[in-house]
Image: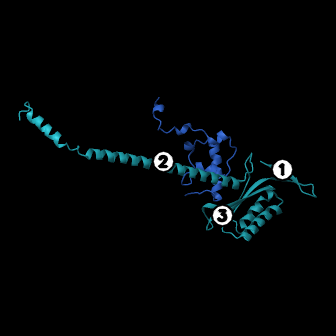
Amino acid sequence: MVTSSVKTSGTDEAVDTRLYECVVLYPHPFGEKEERDLLKNVEALFTDAGALLVSKDLWGRRGLAYTIGEYDEGRFVVYHWMLDPAKLKEIDRALRIEKGVLRHMIVKPPKKYQIVKYSEKYEQWLKQRGEEQHIAAQVEEEKVRERVAERAKRQLARTSERKKEKEPAAPMEKKELTQEIDKLISDDSLDL
Amino acid sequence: MSSLLNKNVRPDPRTKKCPFCFQKTPYIDYKDYPTMRPYIDYFGNIRKRYYTGVCLKHQKMLRGAVELARFMGMLAYRK
């Protein structure tokens, strides 16, 4: 839990604030000016409540897992604010009314929370995954090639064997043939 | 001896160790898609602890993270 006390200028009143994370989802085919206005409005909600901006992370275009308000793609903004917990409800209600916001969520970060910019991390992961897939595809291709080459070799060996089997014995020459026949005829043991 | 002979036999799912405990993960972030991905099956369901080897503490964290991610449209409820 991250809490701190911020003294407002002019008064001695100390306001207890704590870290909150706010995620806003807005549709992807969205005008540039509209987007700017929306972000300005959302930020104004927090700053009016006396919140301090800790970090802002603009995620690019992301595919949604299911359609929300007839949109298949959206953009996310992740804010971290130091905010007075008493003003949370008010902001939540205002965000719900805000035009152009598909979904929003204000979360209390867990213990030992570290702010990470997931937009960069996600892109790195995408790149890494792309490379891994590319390498895997190459390995698969090589395997297929090897298999094809092996099969071709086997086929060749088989066909050559068959040819050998089919080939008739070389015809004897006439001299040899007559000699053989003579031998057979002269052989008495055969008793022809 | 029998285990040496049967190399193709799948290892017992009960003997797996929790990968989050191994890395000493204090929490699982719902925005961290790459870490949650292996624990979600094709249909968008959270995989059983029995098969992934995640300990109960981290399975509960994972469930919370997945539920938040589902609400924000980062993960599917049902594919």
Counting from the top left corner in percent of width and height, residue B57 is at 64, 43
Residue on which the image places disc 1: A4
Q: Amino acid at mark 2?
A: Lys
How was the colour assigned to the protein in this rendering? by chain
Mark 1 secondary-structure assignment: strand
Mark 2 secondary-structure assignment: helix
Residue on which the image places disc 2: A143
Mark with earlier residue (1, 2): 1
Q: Nearer the viewer, residue B15 or A132?
A: A132
Q: Which mark is residue A74?
A: 3
Chain letter belonging to callout 2: A
Chain letter belonging to callout 3: A
> Is residue B15 found left or right of A97 in the rendered image?
left
Mark 3 touching mark 2, by CB under 8 A?
Answer: no
Please tell me which residue is depicted at 55% across the width and 42% down the height of the picture.
B50
Residue A104 shows in the view: no
Q: Residues within 10 Å of mark 1 (few under 14, many from 20)?
A: some
Mark with earlier residue (1, 3): 1
> Is residue A157 found left or right of B8 in the rendered image?
left
Q: Amino acid at mark 1?
A: Ser
Alpha-carbon distance for marks 1 and 2? 60 Å
Q: Quadrant of residue B78?
A: bottom right
Q: Nearer the viewer, residue A148 or A116?
A: A148
Chain A tint in image? cyan
Alpha-carbon distance for marks 1 and 3? 34 Å
